[in-house]
Amino acid sequence: MSPSRDVPLRSRISPLYSILLFLTFPFMMLLPCRSSASADEADACLGCHGSPGMSMTLGDKSTMSVFVNSKELASSVHGKQGCTGCHADVDLNKHPSKSYASKKAFSDQQSKSCRNCHGDDRLFANPLHKRVLAREQAPACPSCHGSHAVRKAAQRTGRSSTTEYCLACHSQPLTKSVNGEMLSLTIDQIWLQESVHRNHECTDCHTAYSKAVHPLPKDLKSLRELSHAASETCSRCHLDKAVKVKDSIHAALLAAGEQKAPGCSDCHGAHRIGRGALEDTVAGNPCRKCHANIYDAYRTSVHGMNRMSEKTSGPLCAGCHQAHDVKPAMASRSPRSMCLGCHRNFENDHRQWLPNPQAHLEMVACTACHVPLAYKRSIYLRMTDGGTGKLLPEQEVLAALGPGAGKNGKIGPKDLWTAYRDLSAKRTVQVSVAVSMNERLNAHYLLPKIKAVRLCEECHAADSSFFQTAAVAMSGPDGREKLLAVDPKVLSSAYGVVFLKRFYVMSGTRITAMDYAGLALVLGGIAVPVVHGSLMALTAKRRKEKKQAS
């Protein structure tokens, strides 16, 4: 190129080049230098911290990993920021020099560093975020967002599953106060992996939540209210079970305002839900959480011992009481229908030693003979509606008895007869009698059949302990059985003969009128042939003469 042509060209470009250089120089100096310095700083730090297994001992003698994965750091949203941009308290000239009392102290220090760039105006823009950070024991920023593999919120939302997204926070120590009660919101991923719902996402049950929407929790009065609200979620998939529960004593108790009544999660768990077969084991049985005393009694029974010995199978709670449509336990009602579900040959088994087993088992509960004699028995008078077979409501029976009944602490024979008469005027009332355990709990102390009570005199004796207590069974407002003590004399009173009808235990109830009637029948049966024979002997001669004369 000739000088003559070079000089004019340079003169033409120079002014424009000068202007561009002036405008871009600050950025050319700032950005490359900053990136280069940050990269050099990161390389220097990773010279040590890039070694797997590197750790630091804290003031409480615990250790904490200080290994940094270089690839995660490079792909982080903070990848171009130097290490001291976050670890501002570290002096590279005197490093290592900084010490921390505990892992929490270290995390809290890092959270303060986060706020140097992320001001309160941004942190509190999200109401849920504000709610968490406003707590006295708020989780540290790295506990949810990570330390070195920090990604933008949009990236976290798009790349992870819903469950992974939720666990970013809920795998950390989170709690919620519900009217003074503390509720843990921490979910262990292992719980979900071992659950029968492991293939479900969090939003399958928590439908109000998503990656984009996280409403503030509803204000609830108690943790029990939360538990029962969660049960409504279960019914969306398990409708058949929910229908059965609606007809259970548990649902009746809840409807009556008893918040302690169990919901789905009380028996099955919330996030670590096991297989249904697990609940049919001694270890996995959920009923013992509320019915510990009954469960202890069951363990000593023939059923419990068989189940725990693993030699033979035996029924657990749901085997007799059902799993979802649990009916109220009644001391006045024989568990005969439950027992016969397994013991189908009961009639032939009992016929070998018991006269007329069908009549006995109609009034005598199985437990009355298959529980040790140390536990008391009682006589129950069940007042039921002739049409439905259900126990009469407590309020109706008490109204029929009137305020003057039971002045001596027990309802007398005449009072009970009067109540029966008045109740029968309004509807058909049936009174059935059952011999059963004095307390429902004691019905679980079942013996092996070889040790069952087989002595007739335990019932058929004038001083039988079986007839020392009696009660009228009614239905309470929540469907559970209510018992009202009555004078045992009702069993041997003339008033009792009318409404007890078929109930009579020879030598046990001692109804005098029936004893006289029985004696008359016996004497009458003996007298007829005696009188007939005597008359025949006395008239033999006359009948013979009369026959000869004819």
Image: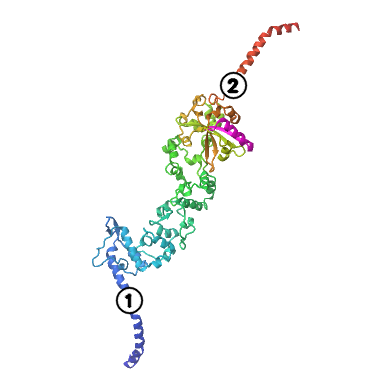
Which residues are the magenta region? Answer: 410-434
Q: In terms of depth relative to the viewer, which is nearer, 250 or 371?
A: 250
Res. 345 in view = no
**Amino acid on which the number 2 mark rests in the picture:** Tyr
Res. 9 in view = yes
Name the residue located 47 percent from the left edge and 40 percent from the top edge: 317
> Distance from label 2 to label 1 (Cα)?
121 Å
Q: In terms of depth relative to the viewer, which is nearer, 478 or 66?
A: 478
Q: Colour mode? A: rainbow
Q: Is residue 59 magenta?
A: no
Using the rendered view, name the quadrant where residue 310 is placed: top left
Label 1 sits on residue: 30
Looking at the image, residue 273 sits to the left or right of residue 94; the answer is: right
In the rendered image of this protein, does residue 182 appear above or below residue 479? below
Assess whether mark 1 and mark 2 are in contact (beta carbons under 8 angstroms). Answer: no
Q: Secondary structure at mark 1?
A: helix
